Image (spheres, rainbow, N blue to C red):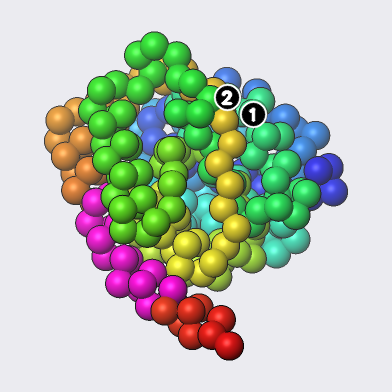
Amino acid sequence: MSALRVTVVMPARNEEASIGRVLGDIPRALVQTIIVVDNGSRDRTAEVARQHGASVVHEPVPGYGGACLAGLARVGAETDVVVILDADYSDHPEDLPALLAPIASGEADFVIGSRVLGGAEPGALPWNQRFGNALACLLMRVLYGVRFTDMGPFRAIRRDALLSLGMRDRTFGWNVEMQARALIAGLRIREVPVRYRRRIGKSKISGTAGGTIRAGTRIIGTIMMYYPAYRRSRRRLAEVDKP
């Protein structure tokens, strides 16, 4: 695992209170570069990130996917694996070895940290977030025939595989777009258990009714949008496999 060159991309908006703790808990022996994307913060998020040794990229237009894309654009060609990690201290950065292990062993191209498998502490996942996550996973299972337990944000993927996906979503649909495009591309996907705790501060998505509705609508729409492309990819694969 130590042979992998790992870059962490961390979208952050007004996370001054938490980002230092996240950066402090990242296993630095496994990570070569940390890129924090300041997504239009009005506090000291960028300053605290620099104090903890991270490189800071500014993406002033709010949007989770847009922040991830801005960070990805700064990832060096020497990187083997890109890790996406939130800045609100809800994930446990110490679980990073669990995400990297299937890639290091050659078993997976893309690993998703499952908060459902790992167990979230009480109150960490509010009911609206649990419901939306379960609904998205159910739709993926019914339409794509693949069982996911989570659309969690803590994930690791080979850099070349991520670039090949051609990610575009600039909003809340980034995570599910990655999973749908990875299925279309035939990537080897694994889920591993990760821990999850109450975040520091208020969520921009599940913390408000409007944010929950916008995120849910975008996620479901993204699943439906990529379904025809997935069906076409399965038909092409079936043609190739014919004797």
- Regarding residue 219, the answer to whether it shows in the image is yes
Pointers 1 and 2 in contact (CB under 8 A)?
yes
Q: Quadrant of the C terminus?
A: bottom right
Identify which residue, 94 or 19, lies in the foreground.
94
Vertical comparison of 105 with 241: above or below: above
Q: Quadrant of residue 160?
A: bottom right
Q: What residue sits 56% from the left and 81% below the top?
A: 241
Label 1 – label 2 distance at C-alpha: 6 Å
- Give the side of residue 30 with respect to residue 110, left or right: right
The dot on residue 2 is none
Element type at mark 2: loop
**Residue located farthest toward the bottom when viewing the structure as drawn:** 243
The dot on residue 95 is 1
Element type at mark 1: helix
- Regarding residue 35, the answer to whether it shows in the image is no
Vertical comparison of 33 with 208: above or below: below
Identity, as a three-letter code, of the amino acid under mark 2: His
Q: Which span is picked out in magenta? A: 219-234
Q: Quadrant of the N terminus?
A: top right
